[in-house]
Amino acid sequence: MTGFAVRRAIEEDLDAWASLRHQLWPHLSIEGHRAEVVDALAQPDRLAAFLCFSPAGNAIGLAEASVRSDYVNGTETSPVAFLEGIVVDPSVRRQGVAARLVAAVTDWARDQGLSELASDAELHNTVSHAMHAALGFEETQRVVYFRKRL
């Protein structure tokens, strides 16, 4: 845990940010991620990203958060902060990187005047469930979404 540094992502972090996002959401191209990062940078009061750096200066973790005013399952207030995604390089997992990233998101949310931080994970992603529980999140609901093609 020693030596890791977390800070809010800035424009100069575009490549590292996009690369970590691609690990989290591989269905989108790197260029697609770069475009979304540029969009996020233009909305600093609604969207935030935090990067964790190794002692050598390499980006090893990312947490993205937003302010959501729509209904967020399991919450009691609105708006709420929402942890949109978090990823930690496999080589440094279980060393406190995710905890530092979530702490940064929590501080940001409090600075926004928000009193809840929500998140979600896919039903099968038990590793994410365990991480959330370890970081102080409580499970509120399990939901299965359906659709019908028309």
Image: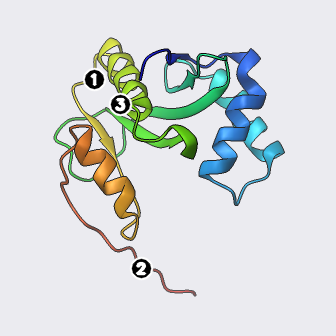
- x, y (%) of residue 55? 59, 16
- x, y (%) of residue 46? 49, 26
Mark toward the start of the polypeptide (2 vs 3): 3
Q: Is residue 42 above or below residue 129?
A: above
Classed neighbour count for the residue bearing mark 3: other residues with Cα under 10 Å, few (<14), some (14–19), many (≥20): some
Residue named by callout 3: 99
Residue named by callout 2: 146
Mark toward the start of the polypeptide (1 vs 2): 1
Name the amino acid type tagged 2. Answer: Phe
Label 3 vs label 1: CA separation? 19 Å
Say which of 4 and 17 sits in front: 4
**Residue at point 21%, 38% (across, down):** 136
Image quarter where the C terminus lies is bottom right
Say which of 14 and 76 sits in front: 14
Name the amino acid type tagged 1. Answer: Leu
User: Which one is in front in this view, the residue at disc 2 or the one at disc 3?
Assistant: 3
User: Which one is in front in this view, the residue at disc 3 or the one at disc 1?
Assistant: 3
Residue named by callout 1: 114
Q: Is residue 43 above or below residue 80?
A: above
